[in-house]
Amino acid sequence: MDASEAGNDAAAPSIDVESDGPLIVRNCKHLLDAEGNALETKPHMALCRCGESKKKPFCDGSHREAGFCGDPEEGGLPDRVDTYEGKQVTVYENRRACCHEGICTEYLPSVFRPGETPRVQPDEGYAYEVERVVRTCPSGALWYSRDGKRGKNDVRDPSIRVQKDRQYDVVGGIELHNPGGEQPAIPEHYTLCRCGHSHRKPFCDGTHLECEFSDDE
Ligand code: SF4
Ligand code: FES
């Protein structure tokens, strides 16, 4: 085993997207289940992204049998930032990055109003609430500024959370090596597909809801 396979305490954590195969995670010490409990980690781990493994979240080679194609599809929403100016807080949204977790619409429906124009109305909530909800967006689709200054990201240890029946939440600025080229909207946090059906692989685009992805199958 060479040094890269064995991992290196001093090396920064990273994720390599393997073509038609798993996510190769190196030097990430924190892998969590949906409740935040620590899962066993190794310096070099392969995480399933085809959705077929019997050992989720780890890869068991099922992608080969399943004929998994890890390529993203053409099209989808444009990589564009929409600005929603408020008196105190301005919200920015890149809808392409959204994984449809629904935190924004669930916790602040007065501000986040899909189907309406404008779809984000920052003045319909307290500034501190808008900031709090934007900071919990896992995908990097949302960020904000206040008094002309961009809101700071939380400083978090690098970790990957395996959300039940849905995506991987990656935080802490883990470097992503994606041969497809697309990079996270916000490098500090992003969400990766593990159902195998996202149109925007390796990123999650919420398709796990339509395909009713389940960890129990
Ligand atoms: S990923 Fe972010 S923008 Fe998309 S629904 Fe969730 S909280 Fe809202
Ligand atoms: S986990 Fe595959 S689209 Fe969300």
Image (cartoon, grey):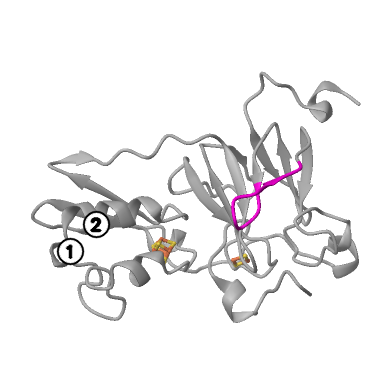
**Residue 68 or residue 146, whichever sits in front:** 146
**Residue 190 or residue 178, whichever sits in front:** 190
- Tell me, yes or no, whether the two marked residues, 2 and 1, touch with CB atoms within 8 Å: yes
Above or below, comparing residue 54 to residue 116 in the picture = above
Residue 153 lies in quadrant: top left
Q: Report the side of 182 relative to 11 (left or right).
A: left
21 in the magenta segment: no
Q: Secondary structure at mark 2?
A: helix
**Residue 13 or residue 29, whichever sits in front:** 29
36 in the magenta segment: yes
Q: Which residue is mark 1?
A: 125
The yes-or-no answer for disc 1 within 8 Å of ligand 1 is no
Measured from the top left, where is residue 35 in percent x and y?
Answer: 60, 56
Measured from the top left, where is residue 86 in percent x and y?
Answer: 13, 57
Overall secondary structure of the magenta stretch?
A: loop
Measured from the top left, where is residue 43 in percent x and y?
Answer: 77, 32
Question: Dividing the image into four equal quarters, which quarter contains ligand 2?
Answer: bottom right
At x 25%, y 72%, the residue is 119
Extreme residue toward the top, this view: 10
Q: Report the side of 28 relative to 48 (left or right).
A: left
The disc labelled 2 sits on which kind of residue?
Glu
Q: Is residue 192 visible?
A: yes
Q: Which residue is mark 2?
A: 129
At x 61%, y 46%, the residue is 160
Stretch in magenta: 32-40
